[in-house]
Amino acid sequence: MKKPLIAVPLGDPAGIGPEIVAKSIADRELFQVADCIVVGDKKVMENAVRITGEDLTVNVVEDPAEGDWREGVLNLIDLDNIDMEKFEFGKVSGMCGKAAFGYIKKSIELAMEGKADAVATTPINKESLRAGEINFIGHTEIFGALTGTEDPLTMFETNGMRVFFLTRHLSLREMLDKITKDRIIDYVIRCTEALRRLGVTEGTMAVAGLNPHSGEHGLFGWEEVNEITPAVEELKKMGYNVAGPVPADSVFHQAALGRYNSVLSLYHDQGHIATKTLDFDRTIAITNGMPILRTSVDHGTAFDIAGKGIAGAVSMKEAIRLAAKYAPFFTR
């Protein structure tokens, strides 16, 4: 049976991305479930192989069709965009920010052209992007723009628990203005469609509460009474299998036990804390609502340990594994 082909952009070269990519490609179990085409810089990749001590041969290709898919071979599209005389591990760099964007852009092109079945991304640094005059705040915004997707959906999967996010990179004060009936209805509808595309057709989606004890009927806040509950009731009338608001101090535990097929978290840290506490290394971001599938590690560039060969690759391996798991639903 043919394995899914996953495009893996190298991430910020000054971070741990190249090292965790090398460790992942060298993993024998992962080799059984996916082929990977890495997009990066040959000099950086060969350096990462040396640092990690992995038994890998870097094979430069122009196109995935030219790949050598034997175990121990790392197939690489070399964009040759790093000057090693100027390169430093663990430093914010416009050169590295611009290079990281180039790797992402090429990986997206491969997936959009049907040459890769999905993209599994490595960490990038927002300051380096800015220094490289790349006007995006992060991966999700880049993927949205380059795939023509207005508002991509972020979903975390951790040991089978799935969490969507109504809001992401907003202050808590700004977030409150986004907790509206219409927005919740829109998101539940789109999240349900995203789950169906991933093959999840059974079960109930829970909408998390915002205030302590979901507001206690206005005692601790009125968002549940005025916006969240009316949204859930209307969604039920429309035929959606949705529950809530379920108090946030219990909803994620119940989802982890299988009571809900997913949770709509209302803000960034509400869902991040829950998933990363459950299993930090295996919290994987999946960007839904796009014409292509993207999974990602959910940790940073770890500049403090970059270049030392000690970075753990569990999250990168899991991101590739999930990309391979869900890719058939996007390519059939």
Image: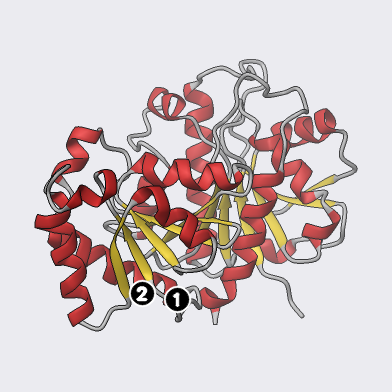
Number of residues whose C-alpha sits closer than 10 Å to that of mark 1, classed few (under 14), some (14–19) or many (20 or more): some
The answer to whether mark 2 and mark 1 are in CB contact below 8 A is: yes
Which residue of the protein is positioned furthest toward the left in this rendering?
A: 226
Question: Is any atom of residue 304 visible in this view?
Answer: yes
Q: Quadrant of residue 127?
A: top left
Residue lying at 70% horizontally and 32% vertically, measured from the top left = 44
Place of residue 319 in the rendered image (x, y in percent of width and height, measured from the top left) = 61, 53
Q: Residue placed at 86% from the left, 46% from the top?
A: 57
Residue matched to label 2? 193
Nearest the camera: 279 or 64? Answer: 279
Left or right: 87 as drawn, with respect to 140: right
Q: Residue placed farthest to the right in the image? A: 55
The N terminus lies in quadrant: bottom right
Q: Who's the residue at 25% across and 51% down the image? A: 214
The answer for how far apart the CA atoms under marks 2 and 1 are is 6 Å
The colour style of the image is: secondary structure
Would you say 246 lies left or right of 97 here? left
Give residue 300's position: percent from left, percent from top. 54, 33
In this orientation, which residue lies closer to the viewer: 158 or 12? 158
Q: Which residue is mark 1?
A: 197
Q: Is residue 77 visible?
A: no
